[in-house]
Amino acid sequence: MRPNSLHAADLAHMVHQQTDLGAHAADGAVLIARGEGVHVWDTEGKEYIEAMAGLWCASLGFSEKRLAEAAYRQLLTLPYYHTFFQKGHEPSVRLAEKLTAIAPPGLNHAMFQCGGSEANDAAIKLAWYYHNVTGRPQKKKIIGRIRGYHGNTVATASLSGQPHMQADFDLPLGDRFLHISNPNYYRAGLPGETEEQFSERMAAELQALIDREGADTIAAFFAEPVQGGGGAITPPRGYFEAIVPILKQAGILFVADEVICGFGRTGHYWGCETYGIQPDMLSCAKQLTAAYQPLSALLISDAIHAALLEGSKRNGSFGHGYTYGGHPVACAVALETLAIYEERDMVGHVQAVSPAFLDGLGALRDHPLVGDVRGVGLIAGVELMADKAKKEPFPAGAKVGLLVQEKCHAAGLIVRAIGDRIAFTPPLIITAAQIGEMCRRFRAGLDAAWAELQ
Ligand code: PLP
């Protein structure tokens, strides 16, 4: 590495996020220089298919000029304004109007933040606020799921079920965060147990937790319709059908974390639509702006909004907000993104290419490393197994997922290893031909990893 090079400066000064810092110190970083469509190039000129759309977010790929122009137009008109103290601006109003029109029924109000963590953090605060204002101040606990990923603030990392995001950060905070099992049927299903029976077992576990803690102490339940950072895990058949009535019965709010699933990823506009969920709050981000600007929205029900009004009267104001929440440039880019989704029928496109995606990856079940492939729309997870006939996982610490990720990288494919599960969420604009090439590169990566393991 040359002194004074970009890579040397990166090593010396940049703290990378969600990174094995020891590996970074030893190997340096891959720095991405430019993008076009579903492809990106690094500073060494190597080309990749970006099969993770960055961080599950660059839905329109890496060269959508209309979004750059929308940002530029707004920068020239009104580069900044806020929504505090009864002030506001057109882009955020128009976006709130649009989002609530396309949201699942009953979510008629939108609050804006800069990212998914802030949206979920706000949802936790609003759950407490709602119950306090409506006379149930003892409802405090929040239920998440093991391996769930809801963000990196103090509260959302506490809610997430990811041990490495809590260890040495003094998290989870207090005793307000509870977790139920991860619904990975392939890994956690018992011998002979059907998917529906597994879902019933998951629901019984939730019921037992509520009975143990007391429904009157629990404020909300958070779930990603398809779990992303936990491994691109689709819910087993009957899962939400079994869980939702239990929460309703116990007066527990359902918060759908659609930060990954929202805007067509699962083959419908919302993951809630794919799985028939009617949430009390819905958080969304990432594909809201196709990732061209940092923005998130928390959509809330009339009942929760009424509590905000009541609380505002009681406390003199609704005491919550961010300087950059609903930034006009981000909102303008979101409006343009949503217009593009509609004009190009992006949901229809996802439905059209999803069979090529799921069948193409599914065909890799014949590979000795691949135990299972599961997905919906344009999100999928591939389980790597030491002995798939015996359903035997690799020993903890063998890091086979990382090996496959590295070999895919060498083959020109960016995927993400989550333990021994490989996640795929390509830009929504990916074509069937590009999916074919993605699968070809993935097989090359698997073959290279297999050869090294022999
Ligand atoms: N929720 C889910 C489901 C996510 O996948 C993520 C990030 O990947 C977040 C929340 C946090 O979003 P952000 O990184 O924008 O804060």
Image (cartoon, helix red, strand yellow):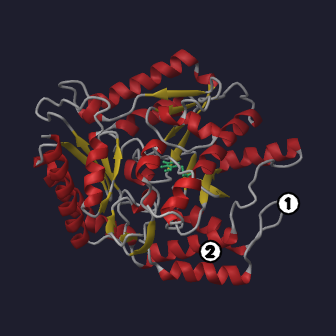
Q: Is 183 left, or right, of 118 in this rendering?
A: left
Any part of residue 375 in sight: no
Q: Which residue is painted at 64% across and 38% down in the image?
A: 154
The circle drawn on residue 41 is: none
Could you tell me if the residues under marks 1 and 2 are in contact, i.e. CB atoms within 8 Å?
no
**Amino acid identity at mark 1:** Phe
Q: How many marks?
A: 2
Element at label 1: loop
Q: Nearer the viewer, residue 201 or 6?
A: 6
Query: How far from the left and from the top, in percent, is residue 377?
Result: 32, 58
Q: Which residue is identified by label 2?
A: 332
Q: Which residue is painted at 71% across and 74% down in the image?
A: 90
Element at label 2: helix
Tell me: is circle 1 under 8 Å from ligand 1.
no
Q: Is 420 left, or right, of 294 in this rendering?
A: left
Q: Which residue is identified by label 1?
A: 85
How would you rate the neighbour count of disc 1 (Cα within 10 Å): few for under 14, some for 14-19, many for 20 or more? Answer: few
Tell me: is circle 2 under 8 Å from ligand 1.
no
Query: How far from the left and from the top, in percent, is residue 363?
Result: 14, 54
Q: Which residue is painted at 53% across and 34% down in the image?
A: 248
Q: Quadrant of the C terminus?
A: top left
Q: Is 19 left, or right, of 106 in this rendering?
A: left
Task: Indicate the quadrant where residue 359 lies.
Answer: bottom left
Task: Indicate the quadrant where residue 410 lies.
Answer: bottom left
Q: Which residue is painted at 59% across and 80% down in the image?
A: 70
User: In this view, which residue lies farthest toward the top?
Assistant: 212
Task: State which tag comes first along the sequence, 1 or 2.
Answer: 1
**Amino acid identity at mark 2:** Ala
Any part of residue 360 in sight: yes
Query: How far from the left and from the top, in percent, is residue 159?
Result: 56, 35
User: In this view, which residue lies farthest toward the front?
Assistant: 3
